[in-house]
Image: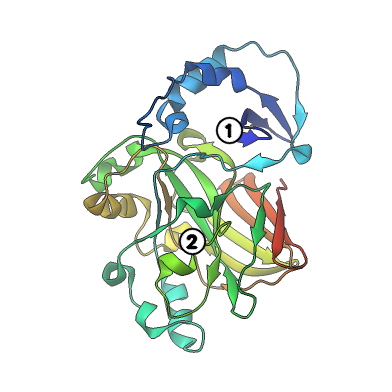
Amino acid sequence: MRLCFFSDDRLGLVEGPMVRDVTDALEVLPAAHYPYPVHDVFIAGLSSVIDRIRKMPDNGKRLDLHNLILQSPVRNPGKLVAAPVNYLAHLEEAIADEETFSRAHVRRIEETGLFLKATSSLIGAGAAIEIRQLDRRTDHEIELAVVIGSPGRDIAQEKALEHVAGYCIGLDITIRGPEERSLRKSLDTYSVLGPWLVTADEFGAPAGKSLQLDVNGETKQLANTKDLILDVPALIAFASRFYSLQPGDVIFTGTPEGVGPIVPGDVIRAAIATNVASRVSMVHRPASGRNASCRRKK
């Protein structure tokens, strides 16, 4: 399934260019009381929600996807875990560009480890990216984002994909500079997730998925997840050695080569192929000033 949140936290089932409102399926989720859970209740109860959707009568009502404001498909993640320089070609381009990439940050992922992005930086495809600190370079980075579905710690690689609820396109917007990654990548609106959640059964194996990011119609990033240094199972195992993973936690798996600057007025299109015949894509149009408005295309 492809599930999205739109407008005022309405739940939608994406069916081609249309969305069926299935918000009533959220009634199966338990009510939360203080102290509130540290995980995402929707993702934790995803199987129950999907069962309810399948039993709901289809009354034929559909909404035009292009007219909807899409929110992040994960509304309350406990943490955003990110992998730096996880494609060899990106590591090589970073090493070659000493003016842009700090020497302290150009090491293999096995040496650098993972880092956390603030959950307050998360937006969906219908929100606006606010490009901040225009005196510094801000870059685009497309990534496959993995949404954890069941809790785990010290997860074995061979069991790792059993803990995945689904996948999204992730955009890791980044200010270049000498500071730690968590600071430069955690500005409000600098983590984009969407346009919807593709459940693990529909997405299939995360290896061998193509990624593409265009700026103003020109392809800047084109790669395949088969070239990850640490693939998705290895990243889940690595992360779970240090963090207890919870439903709704998101792992940004790293960006390939071709990262480059974005400025107000650019149009950014990001896409990930879910299979040979299907692609999920998001389009972002940075507007004037500090804002970058976002929309989604199929």
Residue at x 63% of width, y 80% of height = 135
Q: Secondary structure at mark 1?
A: strand
The colour scheme of the drawn protein is rainbow
Q: Which residue is at the front of the view, 162 or 251?
A: 251
**Mark 2 = which residue?**
186
Q: Residue 42 vs residue 237: left or right? A: right
| Amino acid type, label 1 | Leu
Q: Which residue is at the front of the view, 48 or 292?
A: 292
| Image position, residue 296 (x, y; %) | 70, 48
Q: Which mark is residue 3?
A: 1
Closer to the N terminus: mark 1 or mark 2?
1
Q: Secondary structure at mark 2?
A: loop
| Image position, residue 26 (x, y; %) | 53, 21
Q: Residue 93 vs residue 290: left or right? A: left
Categorize mark 1 by other alpha carbons within 10 Å: few (<14), some (14-19), many (20+): many
Q: Which residue is at the front of the view, 22 or 136?
A: 136
